[in-house]
Amino acid sequence: MCGKLACYAVSEKTSRGRVFAEKPHAFRSDFERDRDRIIHCSAFRRLEGKTQVFTPGLDDYYRTRLTHTIEVSQIGRTIAKALGLNEALSEAICLAHDLGHPPFGHTGEGVLNNLMADFGGFEHNRQSLRVVDLLEHPYPGFAGLNLMYETRLGLAKHRSPYDKPAGGEFAESNCSLEGQVANIADRIAVSSHDLEDGSRAGLIDARQLKDVVLFQEAQNRVKADKIEDKTIRRTRTAKAIIDKLVGGCIEQSRIAIAEAGIKNLDDIYNRPESLIVLPEKSEEQLQELEKFLFANFYRHPSLVSAAREVEQWLKRLFEGLCRRPQLMPGYFQSFIDRQGLQRTVCDYIAGMTDRFTLNRASSLTTP
């Protein structure tokens, strides 16, 4: 340990700073300021109206993209604190990791990527960076939130089974350990909480999970067969999964960091493999659960049917706004000459909530 932070943690002294220099704050560190800028930005607020798996408003108990983000942040803070990392940096990356997610979750992302196939495509991690670097505009002197380099790097390099970073302006092979914490925290939150929501919705039955080891171990740990209340049983099972994975991650990551012989941040940035990891057995079990959810939940016929409707709504909206860009707010219209019409329309749609998307799509007609 080097003071309050481990020697391999990002600190203000080792940071590469901001694009636009700013005076230090009297009461908050630079990474705490990043966290607060993210929380207060409009894109963060709009996550409340964006799909995690189920469209917001269908049920008061399902998660939204915002509640998912908060849960990722809580898991990330726990891991970062236990490992002596920069907790504020991990929290900032966790809170911002889905700012670029479009309406209707991964379905919306796939549709926008297809619509933008001839114009650079669409990927929500790259979009998160566009949000914090360009699209948010709370300051008079520059576009974006002017976040610290390491926060932006964590967004650009965010990885999960559903997130594939694709190069960009950053030459590093990997992000900081704080960014790697956000990666694993996202996976843990998604799998445990989507499992809980899918069970609540009746799209997943416990009998389907009889061969999923992580689920069965969690059920045994909480003595689920003795819990009559279905809500309590689902919740305790999800919490048991989180507890096992987080504890295993902390222990295994300590070992991986020690064995890697890290001397400075460049050693971390130049390693393509992550040092924030799960024990081998837990990693296999988490992958098994992820595969189960993909096959039995995300591809459930009812969700696939809804995805077809989403495709039509987004296509109608995209084509309609490309024909009539004057229907976009003036701020977005100002980007057309610099960013191109299609990219500007994509930026506008990607920032919408599910409900606003439907309202805008219904107001447009196609030939």
Image (cartoon, grey):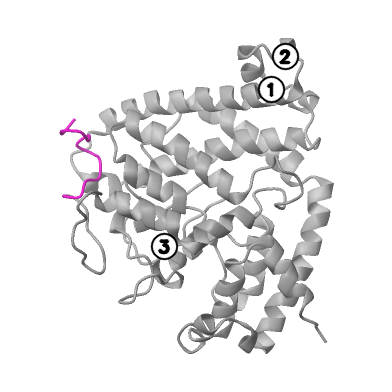
**Label 2 is placed on what type of residue?**
Ile
Range shown magenta: 1-13
Q: Is residue 203 left or right of residue 277?
A: right
Q: Secondary structure at mark 1?
A: helix
SS of the residue under disc 3: loop
Question: Quadrant location of residue 88?
Answer: top left
Residue positioned 37% across, 74% down in the render: 143
Amino acid type of disc 3? Answer: Gly
Q: Quadrant of residue 122?
A: bottom right
As drawn, the label of residue 97 is none
| Badge 2 element | loop
Query: In the picture provided, is 249 more to the left or to the right than 208?
Result: left
Taking the magenta stretch, the answer to whether it contains residue 169 is: no
Q: Disc count in the image? A: 3
* C-alpha gap between disc 1 and disc 3: 43 Å
- Circle 1/circle 2 CB separation < 8 Å: yes
Residue 212 at x, y percent in the picture: 68, 25
Tell me which residue sits at (53%, 52%) in the image: 163
Dominant SS in magenta = loop
Q: Taking 114 as reference, is 78 above or below it? A: above
Q: Which residue is mark 3?
A: 167
Q: In terms of sequence position, does the residue under pointer 2 or pointer 3 come before the other?
A: 3
CA separation, marks 2 and 3? 48 Å
- Kindly identify the residue that appears in the image at 18 percent across and 62 percent down: 23
10 Å crowding of disc 1: few (<14), some (14-19), many (20+): few
Which residue corresponds to mark 1?
Answer: 232
Give whichever of discs 1 and 3 has the lower sequence position: 3
Task: Give the residue at x 58% y 25%.
Answer: 239
Which residue in the protein does label 2 denote? 227
Magenta-drawn stretch contains 3: yes
